[in-house]
Amino acid sequence: MASIHLPRTIRIGGGVLAELPAVLAQNGLSRPLIVTDGWIESSGLLARVQDLLAKAGIAARAFTGVVPDPTVASVEAGCAFLAEGDHDCVIGLGGGSPIDSAKMIAVKGTRRIADLKAPHQEDAPALPIVAIPTTAGTGSEATRFTVITDADTDEKMLCAGLAYLPSFALCDFELTLTKPARLTADTGIDSLVHAVEAYVSKQANPFADSMALNAMRLIWPNLPLACQDPGNRAAREALMLGALQGGIAFSNSSVALVHGMSRPIGAHFHVSHGLSNAMLMPVVTQWSAPAALPRYADCARAMGVADAAESDQSAVGRLIEALHQINADLAVPSPAAYGIDKARWDELLPLMAEQALASGSPGNNPRVPGLEEIVGLYLAAWAH
C-alpha cells in the first residue's frame, strides 16, 4: 500500500513559462510573491516573468535574497518580505534553492524552522506554491520536502510534509539551455541519485518505481550530451522530464544513504548538493548493493549499462564501474581533490555521521549503517 502525492497541475514542455498567467487565473490567484536569487534577477529572467504577469494585469513583488543552500536567516528575510505585502501565493523561480526557499516562506509563518525539521511532518495547508525550475536536477517542483541550513550549527535541516508540495509546476526545458556544463553535470547527477535511491529504498512502491526507472532511462544517456552541447534541445528536454520524474519518485518513496551523507558535506564545506551526491554515489552504491542486488541490477539495465541476459551480480558490477566512469567523464572531484581540508574533514566525521543518521534518510537504505559504518564510508570517499 502506498499514498501518492503530486502537484495539482504540472505543465511540461518548451515555452510553458508563457502559461503562468493562465495557471494563476484558473486557480483564482492574482497576488503572487516571486522568490528567486540574484543570478536569476541579473540574467533578465525575473524581469521577463514580471513582464509576462504585468501584461495579464498581475503585479508581482519579488524577493531576490535567496542564497545557495538557503539559510534560516535568508528564509526569515523572505518571510518578512512576504508579510509586507498582500500575497495569495508564492512562486519559486530558479533552481533548488529558490524553490526550497519559496516552500518554507509559504509555510513557516511565525514558527521556528528548527521546530519543523524531520521527523516533524507539516501537512496543514499553506499558501499555494508555484514552482518554475530553471535547472533539471533537484525535482523540488514535485516534492513534499525542503532543506534549510542552520548556519549556527552547519546543519542542513530536512523538513517534510504535504504543506511543501507545490500546487503547480511549470517545467520549461528552454529555461535550462544556458546552463553551464558544471551545473548541468551536478544537477543531472542529483536527479540520477534521486531515481536510484527511490528505487532501492525500503519505501519503494510500484508507482514510484515506474517514475524512477523512466527517470534513469532519460537521464543516463542524455546527461553527457547536454554537458557536451548545452544547446541540445532534445537532451535538455529529456533531462527536465527525468528530473521531474525523479522528484516524483523520491517524494513518493524516499531518498536513502547517499542523500543522508551528502547534506552534511554541503552544510560544513559548502559543496553543491548535486556534487556532494556524486562524490558519494559510487562508494555508497558498492557498499549498499549486496542488500538489494536485484533492485540495483534493474537500475543498471534501465540505464543501459547492462543487458537483460546478464546476471544481477554482473549487472551491479557494471553499474558501479559506470558510476565511477561518469564521475571521471564529468570531472567530479573527490573531497580531497575539491580542496577540503583533511584535518577539518577528519575532525567533523563523527558529527557528520550523526547528522546523516538524524535526517532519517539512511534508515531507508537497503543496508542500514551505524555511525561507525558511515564514518568508514566518508573515509572511503575522501580520495576516491
Image (tube, rainbow, N blue to C red):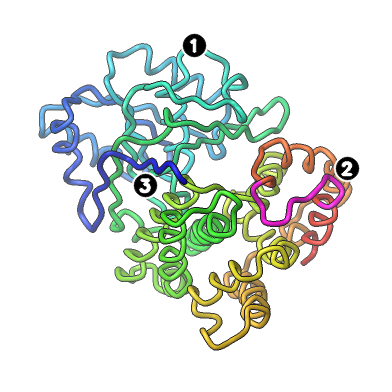
208 falls in the magenta region: no
367 falls in the magenta region: yes
Using the numbered discs, state the Cα–Cα distance from disc 1 to disc 2 in whole angstroms: 36 Å
Pointers 3 and 2 in contact (C-beta within 8 Å): no
Using the numbered discs, state the Cα–Cα distance from disc 3 to disc 2 in whole angstroms: 36 Å
Q: Residue at x 28, y 58 (%)?
A: 174
Using the numbered discs, state the Cα–Cα distance from disc 3 to disc 1 in whole angstroms: 27 Å
Seen in the picture, residue 300 relative to 168 is either above or below; the reply is below
The residue nearer to you, when weighing 136 against 177, is 136
Amino acid bearing label 1: Thr
User: How many numbered markers are drawn?
Assistant: 3
- Helix, strand or loop at label 1? It is loop
- Classify residue 9 by image quadrant: top left
- Helix, strand or loop at label 2? It is helix
Regarding residue 299, the answer to whether it shows in the image is yes
Mark 1: few, some, or many residues within 10 Å (few <14, many ≥20)? few
Residue 8: x and y in percent read 27, 39
- Helix, strand or loop at label 3? It is strand
Left or right: 288 in relation to 181: right
Front disc: 1 or 2: 1
The residue nearer to you, when weighing 141 against 2, is 2
Task: Looking at this view, name the residue that lies furthest to the left.
Answer: 56
Amino acid bearing label 3: Pro
Which circle marks residue 110 in the picture?
A: 1
Q: Which residue is mark 3?
A: 133
Q: Which residue is mark 2?
A: 347
Which circle marks residue 355 in the picture?
A: none
Q: Residue at x 24, y 26 (%)?
A: 60
Compare marks 3 and 1 and give the one earlier in the sequence: 1
Compare marks 3 and 2 and give the one earlier in the sequence: 3
Amino acid bearing label 2: Glu
